[in-house]
Image (spheres, rainbow, N blue to C red):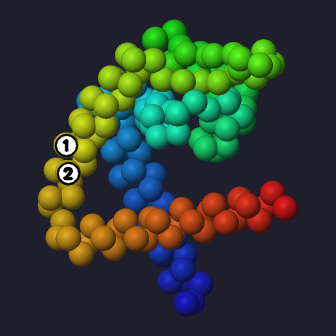
Amino acid sequence: MNQDHLKDLIEQYANVYLFATKKLETLISEKVIPMSMEQFGMLRFLHNCGELTPKEMAEKCGVHKSAITAKAARLVEKGLIERKEHPNDRRYVYLTLTKKGEDIYMQSEQAMIEFVSNFFAQLDGEEVEVFLKVYGKINKMIEQKEEYDKQ
């Protein structure tokens, strides 16, 4: 692939990511779910994984542990998660969903499905599959790079 073509493709990617993805994220957090996408992601991890330490949550979210402490504090204030001490070692803390957090997550997940479905309905099945396959590949490459960089 020549450099000019590659540059054009990267520019198109930047436009799609910066504009379409960010606009979609803003729409979702302002109109579809009662929280930011980051907060939704944290609730999603807790829903899928059960309890997590702040360190584990930071790794899953791709942020520093200190950032998770602040983000978790906001979710605790809202009553969506709670911090639990490890029963045998009080130095360890786990984050877990509250009943309210689970309910809000499930409602938000359903609202997200309905919202995104409207966009997917405007594409044919093959376009959706290709879109998800490409994003999946990019995500896997990023994960592999992160693992390689840790070594």
Measuring 45% from the left and 18% from the top, which residue is drawn there?
98
Task: Give the answer, above or below, for where 41 lies relative to 145.
Answer: above
In the displayed structure image, the side of residue 104 where residue 73 appears, left or right: right
Q: Position of residue 126 (x, y in %)?
A: 24, 75
Q: Position of residue 32 (x, y in %)?
A: 27, 32
Q: Amino acid at mark 1?
A: Glu
Task: Give the answer, above or below, for where 10 lies relative to 2.
Answer: above
Measuring 44% from the left and 65% from the top, which residue is drawn there?
135
- Which residue matches tag 1? 114
Q: Nearer the viewer, residue 41 or 88?
A: 88
Measuring 57% from the left and 30% from the top, which residue is drawn there?
51
**Rendering quarter of residue 93:** top right
Q: Position of residue 125 (x, y in %)?
A: 20, 70
In the displayed structure image, the side of residue 142 where residue 8 appears, left or right: left
**Residue 76 appears in the picture as rendered:** yes
**Residue 27 appears in the picture as rendered:** no
Q: Secondary structure at mark 1?
A: helix
Q: Amino acid at mark 2?
A: Ser
Q: Secondary structure at mark 2?
A: helix
Measuring 28% from the left and 40% from the top, which residue is drawn there?
112
- Which residue matches tag 2? 117
CB under 8 Å between discs 2 and 1:
yes
Q: Disc 2 versus disc 1: distance between alpha carbons?
A: 5 Å
Split into 4 quadrants, where in the image is the C terminus? bottom right
Count residues near mark 2 (Cα–Cα under 10 Å), then give few for <14, some for 14-19, many for 20+. few
Q: Nearer the viewer, residue 58 or 27?
A: 58
Task: Give the answer, above or below, for where 117 lies relative to 96.
Answer: below
- The number of numbered badges drawn on the structure is 2
**Rendering quarter of residue 90:** top right
Split into 4 quadrants, where in the image is the N terminus? bottom right
**Rendering quarter of residue 106:** top left
Count residues near mark 1 (Cα–Cα under 10 Å), then give few for <14, some for 14-19, many for 20+. few
